Amino acid sequence: MSDELFDSVDALLSGVRTGLPDPAERQRLRLAAGLTVTQVAVALRVNSSLVKGWEDGTAAPGPEVAPAYMRLLEGLAARFPAPAPPAAPVPQAAAAVPQPGVALDQNPDGSLVMGPAAPCVQCGQPSVYRAQGRPMHLGGFCRPAAAVPAPEGAAPAGQQAPAAAAPTPAAQGTAVPAAQAEPAQTSPAPAAASPSRPAPQATTAPARGGQRPASAPTRAQGRPATPRTTSPAAVAAPVASRWVPVVALDVAEDDGWVLDVPGFPVPAGPKLGDWFAWLGTGLPLRVERAHPQGRGGDGAVVLTAAALKQLGLPAALPSTNKALNTLQAKLAKAAAAVGMEVSEGIGPVFRAFRRAGSAGGPKTSLQVTVAPWLGQGDARQQAVSALAVPLATAPDGTRDGATFARRYRAFAADLGVAPGATTASTAMLLLDAVRPRVEWVKDEVTGEWSSHLREGALPAGDRCVPVAAGARHPLTRELLSQGRAVCEEEDYKWWARPLTDDEAGRRFAVAVDVCASYLSVTDSLPLPIGELEHVSNPFWGKGKTAGLWLADFSNIAFDEMLPHPATFHGRPPTGPGWYATPTVAYMASTYGFDPATITEAYLSTHTAPLLKEWTTRIRGGYKRVYADLGLIDGQGPQEFLAAYAVHKEVGTDAVRADALTLGGLYKNIYKGGIGKWSDSARHLDDEQWLEKVAGSWSYRPEIRFHIIAAARIAAHRRMRKTYYLTGRAPFAVNVDSYLYATDAPSPIELLPAKDDGSPVPGALRLGIAPGSHKHEASIPLQEAVEAMERREHPSRLTHQYAIDGTPIKTSTATESESTDEQKEGES
């Protein structure tokens, strides 16, 4: 037997720690170790379907691999002994059963004799091996004949039962791509506890980030459930995931390794080679796939400052090319000693991996984040680690590995993906994770697997039409040079009107801001997924088709106390223009516009709520973190205002600090994701931009136009309903910030309410839920008036006054926030 196979198995054995019962011993041992079928198959250099066959009795390992497989099972059995079986009567045929120590029959070349599967003379379970010509299992792996396998859902006392998992193609004896042969999401997490240890207690608030939110779709959705019997105890027991997305490696007081995940295996020694050997043992580090057709993500290891010192690595990222090259060579040499490699260009974030077939262990790939190095390096290195910096920044401003790992796990549990390089790229990673563009299909004739676009997937390639190609596209520049109209669906920008006499007599300008305005519309919004086709005299069909329509609203009467609903500048249009379906639908239903007057349109060949699952994930994470900050749905106006006023005061509370950081990231992810649909990528020249950006599946300006239009229309609808109920209208609007003239420095007087005091649906209301409003600032009205007289927009003053109307110190950072607000949704 090859030493390489033994080394591979030994590497696999060295990384396992915990167990879970199952009726078949081979499968029990694998699951007990937390190993996937794919990991075992890679270690033994066989197809994963063969391993499945070995575990269900439909196949047997050949003579060239049987010794290595037996070595693996023996090693696992030594670590995870089966519970003692109940006493059973000895069958009458016991006299014919080979006694312990009887060797299995062998061929002249030393390989084991095998035949058709037949009942073992000891346990009655199928066996392909022979001892003295009779069917018999490999030594030590029989079950007593009287022992009846427990139901799959039931677990021996003191052990945690696995949740039901949908059958995968691999379970049916077919070969699948490695990316699809992953374990079910509800498998148990690694733990060092013995089989008799009680199930872990429910986690406390700081650990909740490792749990998947209730709204998250599981891998089994859309597949028929496998009937199984489950004990009441198993139903009640909390079941965690087998996979952990990230661990932080630190050093204990005795200079030993310590990890922030209990029961996780640690490196065997303090040297750099020991660390790489540990990374290559097939650690249960992975971000699970969020959709049955999707792919999981690589797990991550984060190094603390103490871990860096222990490994002999520099405390700061080298600043010269020579020093960086030296560091690269040092890491590469240590990695190569155990068959591993490191990515080129070492920085705060890099990858450690082993290719399939390399000596030393199974194929593996992990992300390595060095917390003390974050924020260092050249522009490229900082860009790659941009999102990691806030995740690792503790309340005292230091880059902390444990903080990074804790927030990373919460992030992955909330959204279902690992953080990407930027918020905008993460938004697209999330969309592809919850709504994969491709699926794998097996050719029944050749048995080969291939991928193709799923139904309703966004295709790659430049799909732009002239009227909605984005500001940087040559098609847009050509139309504008000809004086022709293009689509200009944008958020409200700098609209203001003169105050009425009644408003001028009030004392304050109260600014209210919409919470998560885009998330309030993207859940069920029909979007143009298919190609946009030019249509003359299009059929309106009550706006069920997403697209762009050439409509003339210049003669439509509107509410002059409010900005015009169809234009970003808030002034009435002067002629025909191109508008997305949400704008045309609102003008038709609310202001009497006749869609039959539309003579031209670009209509999508496929309309669907593309961002439904994407919205569900982000909104679920958004609500969870704000609940940790004391802001929850259903709070009364005064209760919400009081909680919001102090929600940024985190002190030393890790839960609140994590929630505040994650809340900011989630908001930037949905904003950046909306902007990504029309990415201008200013760092690329025109030719590169056309190839890398405009040719990508994620460049679809018409999708952004629909989202922006829907958000602006939703804002106008709320303003209009509030105006009709209370007679109060904003005198200035910028993006989703509205300024109202009030008597007191509070928005309470603006809120319409029912007779019972509850808020009126669809009107101005306070709360943290997407589409509700928060109190941004209270500005002395005279200051706002003077700003408008200087032809400045009063929203610039919102960062100069507190919510009680008193001036606050400003900084360059806070003053720039108004500009950032203005650009919400842009790239």
Image (tube, grey):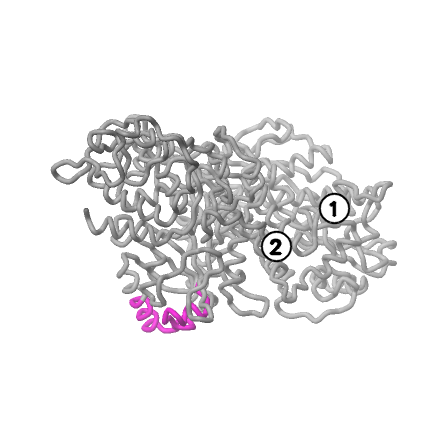
Label 2, on which residue? 205
At 46% from the left and 66% from the top, the residue drawn is 304
Q: Amino acid at mark 1?
A: Gly
For the question of whether residue 649 can be seen, the reply is yes
Tell which of 167 and 532 is nearer to you. 167
Residue 776 is left or right of residue 260, and the answer is right
Mark 1 in CB contact with mark 2 (< 8 angstroms): no
Q: Earlier in the sequence, mark 1 or mark 2?
A: 2
Above or below — where is 483 with respect to 810?
Answer: above
At 68% from the left and 47% from the top, the residue drawn is 769
Q: How many numbered circles are shown?
A: 2
Residue 793 coordinates in the image, percent (x, y): 71, 60
Q: Secondary structure at mark 1?
A: loop
The part of the chain drawn in magenta is 303-330
Q: Amino acid at mark 2?
A: Ala
Residue 253 is left or right of residue 786, and the answer is left
Label 1, on which residue? 634
How many other residues sit within 10 Å of disc 2, few (<14), some (14-19) or many (≥20)? few
